[in-house]
Image: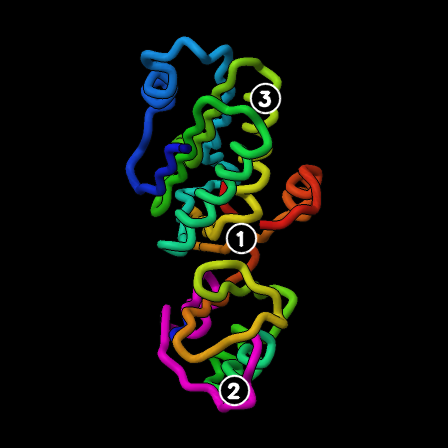
Amino acid sequence: MARILVQEALFDMATESAALTAGRTDIGGVASFLGVCRGDDALAAMVLEHYPGMTERALGRIAAEAEARWPLTGCTVIHRVGRILPGEPIVLVLTASAHRAAALEACAFLIDWLKTKAPFWKREEFADGDARWVAAKNDDDAAAARWSVKNI
Amino acid sequence: MRILYFAWLRQKIGFAEEEVTPPAEIHDIAGLREWLATRSPGHAAAFADAKQIRAAVNQDFAAPDHPVAAGDEIAFFPPVTGG
């Protein structure tokens, strides 16, 4: 059962990684992806909106799909919402397994799918007061599609 | 029927949710979208480009031909950009 959190608060990757492996002797590898807010073009902040209820449901389904496809012994997905400053973390995916291939593949799958199948929307706020919604990228759809056309 | 709007749809319409009773001939997402677009200039602007709009019925992504019924929670939003 994956640990799934949608929160405004900062999180600590090292703490989460330690919690995933604490007291376990069946884990041979932990893979991680940490998404960080870049400060391009005088970005002042990134504001993450989501659909409370559906977000948790979508992340739960994506994690369940990963657990069905790979023999994971641990999985953590944390996605922040609200106002995020350049340099701060946005999203964390951790996957643990007996062997590295499953952990690495499942981690890549989770971040690819959550970018295209979970209801989050980013708005960029700039230093000059301008703001704009981030447009979805075709690259993200292609990355998600490489994990097969199967839908959830 | 409860309708929710997110991101720039919410901004263009001016509020995040509304309770509506569409006419009986509205039976799917595409029909509901077209009917909602007639409710105000803000709705019309938000729904102007159907290709940029996604939907969910009762918190699951739903295609334009997905049926809608009284009591459903229906959300309209742009393509997602999380991660």
Residue A102 is labelled as 3
Marks 1 and 2, Cα distance to the nearest angstrom? Answer: 25 Å
Q: Name the residue that disc number 2 marks.
A: B38
**A140 w.r.t. B33: above or below:** above
**A8 w.r.t. B12: above or below:** above
Marks 1 and 3, Cα distance to the nearest angstrom? Answer: 27 Å
User: Residue B15 in magenta?
Assistant: yes
Local secondary structure at mark 1: loop
Q: Position of residue A119 (x, y in %)?
A: 47, 52
Q: As shown in the figure, which amino acid type bears the numbered disc 3?
A: Ala
Q: Position of residue A53 (x, y in %)?
A: 37, 54
Q: As shown in the figure, which amino acid type bears the numbered disc 2?
A: Thr
Q: Camera-side residue: A22 or B55?
A: A22
**In which quadrant of the rendered view does residue A9 lie?**
top left
Q: Which residues are magenta?
A: B4-28
Marks 2 and 3, Cα distance to the nearest angstrom? Answer: 50 Å
Name the residue located 53 percent from the left edge and 79 percent from the top edge.
B32
Assess whether mark 3 and mark 2 are in contact (beta carbons under 8 angstroms): no
Name the residue located 42 percent from the left edge and 49 percent from the top edge.
A57
Q: Name the residue that disc number 1 marks.
A: B80
Name the residue located 43 percent from the left edge and 74 percent from the top edge.
B13
Residue A115 is labelled as none
**B79 w.r.t. A114: above or below:** below
